[in-house]
Structures are given as structure tokens and as C-alpha cells.
Image: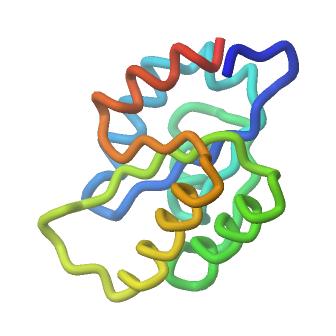
């Protein structure tokens, strides 16, 4: 995944995981900023406000943002998905989350769902 052109990277986090996403993105700000960033609505707004990222914001996950990301994966428009999920909280849109992760796996999109995996994956974005 070493790139000469910017990659399209999606950043998504469930509510209780948003602070962790912000802290993670701050650590890798220089690397992430060299790529095309996209996020679901609330996560994207928070990353823009806290870090100043130029980021394309989609709908909020439960309101269609997960489906928008799924469509991007199907169309080959997303290189990586970093999705910090909350394994201890039920999500009202769990079916959308499962669909998104299923598509990422099916279309062989780079996928990180926790900090340690995201740490490993981000070094491929340089």
C-alpha cells in the first residue's frame, strides 16, 4: 500500500470511541494529512474541529454514512477504513456496521478496528 498518490482513508468511530480516534489521529496527523480523508458526519466534524483536518464529511453513520462508505468500497473509491467500534455497547444501527465491515472484507479494503491495528496500518500510508 505504499503510495505515490494520496490514498482515500475513512475514519469512523462510535460515540464512546471518538476521543480515542481524535488522540490516534493527532499522533499520525502528518501522515494522515497527506491523504484524502473521509469520515462519517460526527467523527469528521470532531476531527476537523480538534485537529484541523481537511476532511470530507458524509452523513452520520446511523443516518446513512455507513452506507455511503459501503458504496465507496464497492466502487473502489476507498483504500482503507479505520473504524473504532465500541464492543461493549449495543449499536442501534448494528446491521449497517456489519454490512460495512463485510464489504471491506469482501472487497479486500484495508481495515483496522482498534488502535493497535490502526497503528500498524498507518505506516503503510507514508
State whether residue 101 is above or below residue 27: below
Residue at the image point whose x is 83% and y is 62% from the top: 75
- Left or right of 40? Residue 88 is left
Q: Position of residue 76 (x, y in %)?
A: 80, 53
In the rendered picture of this protein, how many numbered marks are placed on residues? 0
As drawn, 74 above or below 113 = below
Image-quadrant location for residue 95: bottom left
Report the residue at 65% width, 55% height from top. 107
Q: Nearer the viewer, residue 109 or 68?
A: 109
Instruction: Measuring from the top left, give residue 87's x and y in whole percent.
Output: 19, 62
Considering every residue shown, the one lying at the far right of the view is 5
Q: Is residue 95 placed above or below 60 in the rendered structure?
A: below
Q: In this rendering, would 35 be left or right of 108?
A: right
Q: Nearer the viewer, residue 70 or 34?
A: 70
Residue 77: % across, % down: 81, 51
Q: Residue furthest left?
A: 88
Residue 27: image x %, image y %?
43, 18
Residue sitting at 41 percent across and 55 percent down? 13
Q: Viewer-proximal residue, 106 or 116?
A: 106
Question: What coloring was used for the rendering?
Answer: rainbow
Q: Quadrant of the N terminus?
A: top right
Seen at 41% across and 31% down, the residue is: 118
Q: Quadrant of the C terminus?
A: top right
Q: Nearer the viewer, residue 65 or 42?
A: 65
Q: Quadrant of residue 124?
A: top right
Is residue 80 depicted above or below 23 in this figure? below
Amino acid at each position: 500500500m505504499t503510495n505515490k498518490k494520496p490514498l482515500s482513508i475513512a475514519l469512523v468511530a462510535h460515540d464512546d470511541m471518538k476521543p480515542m480516534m481524535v488522540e490516534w489521529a493527532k499522533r499520525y496527523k502528518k501522515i494522515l494529512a497527506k491523504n484524502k480523508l473521509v469520515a462519517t458526519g460526527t467523527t469528521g466534524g470532531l476531527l476537523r474541529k480538534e485537529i484541523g483536518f481537511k476532511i470530507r464529511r458524509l452523513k452520520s453513520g446511523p443516518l446513512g454514512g455507513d452506507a455511503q462508505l459501503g458504496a465507496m468500497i464497492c466502487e473502489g473509491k476507498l483504500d482503507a477504513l479505520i473504524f473504532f467500534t465500541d464492543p461493549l455497547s449495543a449499536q442501534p444501527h448494528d446491521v449497517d456496521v456489519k454490512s460495512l465491515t463485510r464489504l471491506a472484507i469482501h472487497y479486500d479494503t484495508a481495515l483496522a478496528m482498534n488502535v493497535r491495528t490502526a497503528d500498524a496500518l498507518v505506516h503503510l500510508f507514508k
